[in-house]
Amino acid sequence: KQVGKGVVAVDAATGAVVAAFAPNVTTLSGFAVNALAVGGSDLFIGGTLDSVGGQPRPFAAAVALTSGKVSAWDPRPAGPARAIVAAGASVWLGGAFFGAPSSNRAALARFDGPGLALAAADAALEGAPATVYAVAAAGAHWYIGGAFAKAGGVAVSNLAAVEQGSWTVAGTS
């Protein structure tokens, strides 16, 4: 029996694969899962996903930590998710995409609240094409790394620190 196709859970004490955790992640041919983050009772998964648990989840999804059962969260970025951070009531999704649901977000989108709705604020990353490979939170800032020339209209070189609440590039407000 194949357990946890695409993503597996391993018992920290025994090193054994946890058979009850079986999200059944399928990816586009020849591609992979690129990012994982834990937030609350969910595991957020990003990459060149096609489906999770038999449900369409292009490029990003969330599953229950205990069972691997797919959640209702369905962000549908228009390209591969390469970085995910879950912090507090927010999930940040970065990658090689232009467009998150009903928006023109390039490479980075934030989802907030209990239903993880797309946040109104935008980091306004620019580049040809803008891609986010890493996101980290520390103190009052989020750090974004990737391939982009501007963040919020400010010239940067592939790395930006933005203020958590406003997406303003640190040091410019």
Image (tube, helix red, strand yellow):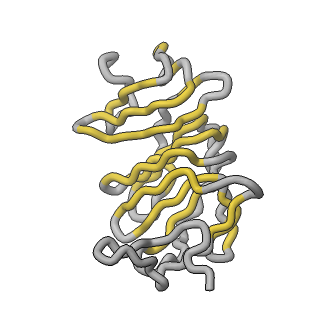
On screen, 59 above or below 120?
A: below
Q: Which quadrant: the C terminus?
A: top left
Residue 114 is drawn in which quadrant? Answer: bottom left
In the picture provided, is 44 more to the left or to the right than 143?
right
Residue name at image x 32 percent, y 71 percent: 12
Residue name at image x 34 percent, y 66 percent: 40
On screen, 13 above or below 96?
A: below
Q: Nearer the viewer, residue 32 or 52?
A: 32
Residue name at image x 51 percent, y 52 percent: 35
Q: Position of residue 28 (x, y in %)?
A: 74, 57
Q: Position of residue 118 (x, y in %)?
A: 51, 50
Q: Nearer the viewer, residue 25 or 153?
A: 25
In the picture provided, is 97 more to the left or to the right than 63?
right
Q: Position of residue 32 (x, y in %)?
A: 64, 55
Q: Nearer the viewer, residue 77 or 117?
A: 77
Q: Furthest-top residue in view?
A: 155
